[in-house]
Amino acid sequence: MNKSEALLELRDVSHGYSLRAGATLRVIENLSLEVRFNEFLGIVGPSGCGKSTILRIMAGLIKPLSGVVTFRGSILNGTTPRISLMHQIPPLLPWLTVRENIALALIARDDLTEEEKRLKVTQFLELVELTGYDSAYPYELSGGMKQRVALARALVTDPDLLLLDEPFSNLDPLTSLSLSREIEYMWLESTLPPISVVMVSHNIEEVVMLADRIIVLGSRPARILAEVPIEMQRPRNKKSEEFYRLVDEVFSLIS
Amino acid sequence: MLWEIITAVTLSWARIAAAIILSVSAALVVGIYSGISRRVDRIAIPVLDVLQSVPILGFFPIAVYILAKAIPSVGYEIASIFLIFTCTFWNLAFGVYEGARSIPQTVLEVAELSKLSHTERLRKIYIPATFPKVADQLPASLANAFYFLAASEVMALGEAEVRVAGIGTLILRYQEIGNYEGIVLGILATALSIAAVYLLILTPIISYSDKYRFDVIKPAAGATPSLLRGLYSRFKSIQAPLKVESRRISEAAQRLLPTQFVNVKYMRSDLMRLLLIIFIVASLVLLVPRIYANMDDVWAAIMSVAAAGLRLGLTNVGEALAYSFLRVLACLALMTAFSIPLAYFMSEKPRIRASLLPALQMLAAMPSPLIFPIISSLFEAGALTRELGALLLMALGSIWYVFYSTLSGFSRVHSEYLELAEMYKLSSVQRFRYIYIPFATPSLVTGLITATGGAWNTVIVAERLGEGGAIFEVYSPGLGKMMSTLAEMADTAGLVFTVIVMTVFVILVNRLLWRALYDYSIRALRIHEQV
């Protein structure tokens, strides 16, 4: 097996949607990038540049028109429990309780016993600080709590890679700060999933706060404008000069 | 003969077009105003609900009689259009109402802030916003119009029977004289004309209406046959003013309304309902003396209706009602069993859906006389198959309401949920159980409510079928059979009595059973107006 350094790799990936017979809207053209082991990768770009499409290609939800996606050295064909995606607006099923919503991720797994599934769900409920909300329904939760249920659901499968699609864009600043700390903690903690995280966002501060490396995308069709390594110490201080400088740098690359 | 058929098809289409235009206009007016004004809502929706569940076919002889007497020259034409209207209006009206009710509050606030005038609001918001619902409902309306075409083109009261010229009556005549070539040609011509209208008019309208939808539409691959792409790209040039607006609105709506569900909340006022029943009974009472011109006393009319009730025997009527109710329930079970698997299959396979929908549309639009031969052979075979034939006839009249509602319920499942199912590798059964069924339940129940009305209406035809001079009826009792017999004997008092019995029963069941079921499903699924 090819032991590459990357956890996940996109090679020459192009994708588009057919508009009318003949015409195609190119969303991504010849994009190559890698997600390394133990990396928090941020992807920023103007809205509508195809960030979400890239994330869905990484998740195996969309098969690109051309190019190759490899995960742990082998070609990615469709979805796998090893890769989880957290949506911008958490699609929780209103008729299932918090526990049932999280358990949904394990429902099709036959390598775990019911008891093991139950324990796992309990463990992640605890991790996202929702113990006691087992039997609550989504409509009874605040936006931040819903997002945490979605996080627990994304992590309960023990994924190697967690993909985040604008996870904080619908939350108030305080809630998004605490959720971002939670995600950072899970990722840093080596006993917990995931190994690597990819976060897509148009909020530069958010990304600078969390990422090891930022890929700046240009608008349609998406291509890489720049790559910015962030080597700041964690936990990062939003008020430090270095932070401001990095945000400025990324900002000037986009605009 | 060919010329005869072409003329008949054209005449029928003219009638149907008139009825549909009338239905859409009336549905827009009633639906929009009930959707936006609490006061209108409180009155109009219960009225619609009652009228919809009233066995229309039972009223027809009376209505036709009045119209024909009032305007002898065109009375029958108008009556025929009116009959078609009653087949096409209800689902449109409820669809528009649902559409008007689900306009996001933010959009209405924008209209308020920018001080749009009344007409501007109608033109820029209400009509465009409810347009997709109209487009969704048109196929069902059209199918229904054709299904009942023969019934709508034949008007009978007692011995007298008037037929207006059209393809429904023409096929009926061919059947009576045994002109099989004519029947086949007539069916072919009808099918062709429906196919043409579906492909050239309905499909572009439906695709075009997608632009006006508030909810996120999953990119349905090949939802429209490519042949038509060019055609409606021309339609595209017509639209412009609302495009930007509606996109901006839909973005806001996505945030506000992660899931939109049908909200049928029009059962607020029991008092209103009671008043309505009184109103209907009163108007019936007022109609009867007109028919019995020699009896000018209202009391005498009431007494004659009551006497008719006693004459028929209350146990007989009760028994007949019970049997008919069982038939309606069986019919609903049949429709659900048909609709859910097919709608599920079609939502999972968008490509098949694209090619199957027009075929289904054509199947749905087959005029009922076409299946009479099949039904009557079932009727001839024996008692049990006779019941089956009646069931089939009832189901075919309104199965499309259930099917299209289920389909639209399934298409409410947003792509994020399907991605979830894909990520966690849910099996088909799990997908169905955890995602599709709960999402579609409110729509399914709404469809069933509409279909119940339809099934009760068809009971009259289904339990006692006259075909080519012969009459087939179910062996067991049935209220429809009773009504049909009474109509034939021109026993108006008896007919009125049975109509009242059926109406009251239908309303009670509607109120006690269906609404409760709907509310229960909403509660059990934790679906709240703004999730």
Image (cartoon, coloured by chain):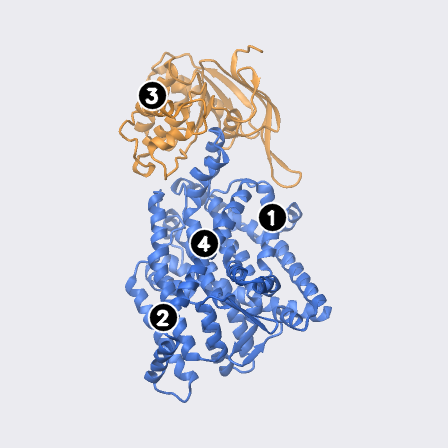
Chain colours: A orange, B blue
Picture coordinates of residue A234 (x, y %)? 35, 13
Q: CA distance from mark 2 to mark 3?
A: 74 Å
Identify the residue at horizontal 64%, vertical 38% (top origin).
A23
Name the front one of labels 2 and 3: 2
Q: Which residue is mark 4?
A: B447
Residue B315 badge = 2
Dot 4 amino acid type: Gly
Query: What is the secondary structure assignment of the residue under circle 1?
Result: helix
Identify the residue at horizontal 52%, vertical 50% (top origin).
B338
* In this rendering, position of residue B142 left or right of residue B287: right
Is residue B452 visible in this depiction of the protein? yes
Counting residues from the start of the chain, the first of labels 4 and 1 encountered is: 1
Q: Which residue is mark 1?
A: B356
Q: Judge if badges 3 and 4 mark residues of a common chain.
A: no
Q: CA distance from mark 1 to mark 3?
A: 51 Å
Mark 4 surroundings within 10 Å by alpha-carbon count, few (fewer than 14), some (14 through 19), many (20 or more): many
The quarter of the picture where the N terminus of chain B appears is bottom right
Asked if labels 1 and 2 touch by Cβ distance under 8 angstroms, the answer is no
The answer to which quarter of the image holds residue B372 is bottom right
Mark 3 surroundings within 10 Å by alpha-carbon count, few (fewer than 14), some (14 through 19), many (20 or more): some
Name the front one of labels 3 and 4: 4
Q: CA distance from mark 2 to mark 1?
A: 47 Å
Residue A181 badge = 3
Q: Is residue B267 above or below residue A53?
A: below
Chain identifier of the residue bearing label 2 in the image: B
Q: CA distance from mark 2 to mark 4?
A: 32 Å
Name the front one of labels 1 and 3: 1
